[in-house]
Amino acid sequence: LKKDRACVLAAVRSSPQALGFAAPELRNNREVVTIAVEKDGYAIQHASEKLKSNREVILTAIEEAGSGVVEFIPAAMQKDSLVAFAITQSKRSSRQPDEPGADDAAPP
């Protein structure tokens, strides 16, 4: 079943982390990996090294899961200008806004 493309596609559609149980050739299949990271960006950790270095796969993972997936992206790709920009934007958008009125609080 690990090598059955249709079975693996069905599995990653319902549980993207199932990619980790797929045969190596399917973890190197762009369609399979893209479907997984579209649903759970952290599934990139189970992708082949080749696809962990694929800009489109990386950007999809960052878009879905945020900058937390950086640990699974090769250092060379983290320096790619588009990837670095996406990481920066993701970090900015994940910041919690200040609590309303916090600046207006009276001193104790």
Image (cartoon, rainbow, N blue to C red):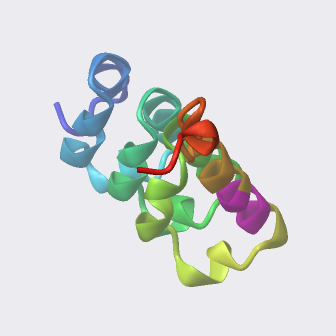
Residue 106 lies, with reference to residue 13, above or below; the image says: below
Magenta range is 83-88
In the image: residue 28, left or right of residue 88? left
Q: Position of residue 90 (x, y in %)?
A: 64, 49
Residue 16 lies, with reference to residue 95, above or below; the image says: above
The chief SS type of the magenta part is helix
> In percent of the image, x 72 and y 52: which residue is there?
89
Residue 103 lies, with reference to residue 46, above or below; the image says: above
> In percent of the image, x 52 and y 76: which residue is there?
74
Q: Position of residue 84 (x, y in %)?
A: 73, 68
Q: Quadrant of residue 104?
A: top right
Is 94 or 85 nearer to us in this picture?
Answer: 94
Q: Position of residue 102 (x, y in %)?
A: 55, 40
Q: Position of residue 51 (x, y in %)?
A: 54, 58
In the image: residue 71, left or right of residue 53? left
Is 41 or 53 nearer to us in this picture?
Answer: 41
In the image: residue 52, left or right of residue 58? left
Image quadrant in which the N terminus is located: top left
> In percent of the image, x 54 and y 46: which residue is there?
66
Q: Is residue 61 magenta?
A: no
Is 40 or 52 nearer to us in this picture?
Answer: 40
Residue sitting farthest toward the bottom: 76
